[in-house]
Image (cartoon, rainbow, N blue to C red):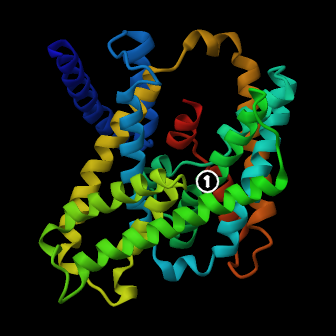
Amino acid sequence: MTEALHSILFLLILVFGLGMLAGKLSAALKLPDVALYLALGMALGPGLHLIHVESGSMTNQLILTLGSTIILFDGGRNIRLSGLGKVWISVSLLSVPGVLITCAAVAAAAHWLLQLPWLYAALLGSIIASTDPATLIPVFKQVRIRTKVRETVESESAFNDATGSILTFSVLGLVVGGGTFSLGSGVADFARTALGGVAVGCVIGFALTYATAHLKLGFLRDYATIAMVVTALGAYLAGDWLHVSGFMATFVAGLIWGNAETFKMNMNDQLQEMGHFTDNVTVLMRMLIFILLGSQVQLGVIGAHFWASVGVIAVFMLIARPLTVFLCAGPDRRAGWTWRELLFMCWVRETGVIPAALAV
């Protein structure tokens, strides 16, 4: 027991201590901090063998879930409903057909370049088909971009988790031979998972926002920061218990929390305190998540399939993403996308925490 406790404390001290140095270096080099966290994890894990956290361990699962939940909630909290109303068509198309397009393109590349059977190639494509808010949100805090573009890509990252999850488990059922694919059941599962997550997020988000932000009945106003954490974790847990998308529930709860004024509630007096808290917590979670992800990289496997993997990544970046953006967002006349905005969205397509959790 004591040895395990010391091991966890050593891990936290090592990650946070060196993570601060990596963060300062990333700011000086004007690079996304997550890139340096991944490199640091690779140095500490397969390089120096100082970190030994298995991808399937309870510690790793807890960090992935806790970190992605808080970061996803904060992403929803920073999106304005008024802006989302202008781009909902693009978000919807990117989140459902867009995931299928990406999966198909990556599966084809993996089949031909990695010589994977079609089912396994489709499994790889489905796992990495969804984008990642835990990576995007920190990057967007470092780069000044138009609000419409930021909110569209962040919302896509949140909403497509349900699509990616359902697609992954559907293909996995075929791979292990324990299931058969049905378009009707797939659509029904998606509707239940996604819409169920939205419903759970609305209920928990509104209830705790009301208890915190209502001018007369907000008895939790003095504990706004704590109530915010309870809302984020509670929405995820409730969604998971009900077998719907916990990440969708968390994002929607954050969306309601951040748009309290739309529902005639107000917590402006708590904004500064909540902002400082979420900024610090999300930095800690990013350090833990991406340094641990880097430490779990198997350099031998990468070396054995290096050039074929680079080819798959090239298709992923240069074909799948542009195809997805131009087919799904391009026709949306309501959003009024410019070529520069569409090209920017083609290059903003991070994959990280949620696909990592699906892989595990």
For the N terminus, the quadrant is top left
On the question of residue 95 being in view, the answer is: no
Q: In this view, does 283 lie above or below 337?
A: above
Q: Can residue 210 be seen by looking at this rendering? A: yes
- Which image quadrant is residue 54 in? top left
- Asked if residue 191 lies left or right of residue 354, the reply is right
The image shows residue 86 at horizontal and vertical percentages of 61, 81
| Residue at screen point 38% across, 87% down | 263
In the image shown, does 341 or 253 lie closer to the viewer? 253
- Residue 305 lies, in percent from the top left, at 71, 15
Secondary structure category for the residue under label 1: helix
Give residue 187's quadrant in the image: bottom right
Q: Position of residue 107 (x, y in %)?
A: 80, 35
Foreground residue, 232 or 276?
A: 232
* Residue with the most extreme left position: 222
The three-letter code of the residue at mark 1 reads: Ala
Residue at the (77%, 36%) spot, across then down: 179
Q: How crowded is mark 1: few (under 14 residues within 10 Å), some or many (20 or more)?
A: many
Q: Is residue 111 above or below residue 243?
A: above
Residue at 80% x, 50% y is 101
Quarter the C terminus occupies = top right
Left or right, 43 with reference to 87: left
Relative to 48, is 103 on the left or the right?
right
Q: How many marks?
A: 1
Q: Where is residue 274 in the image (x, y as percent from the top left)?
A: 23, 64
Which residue was labeled with disc 1?
162
Q: Which residue is drawn at 68% across and 44% down?
A: 129
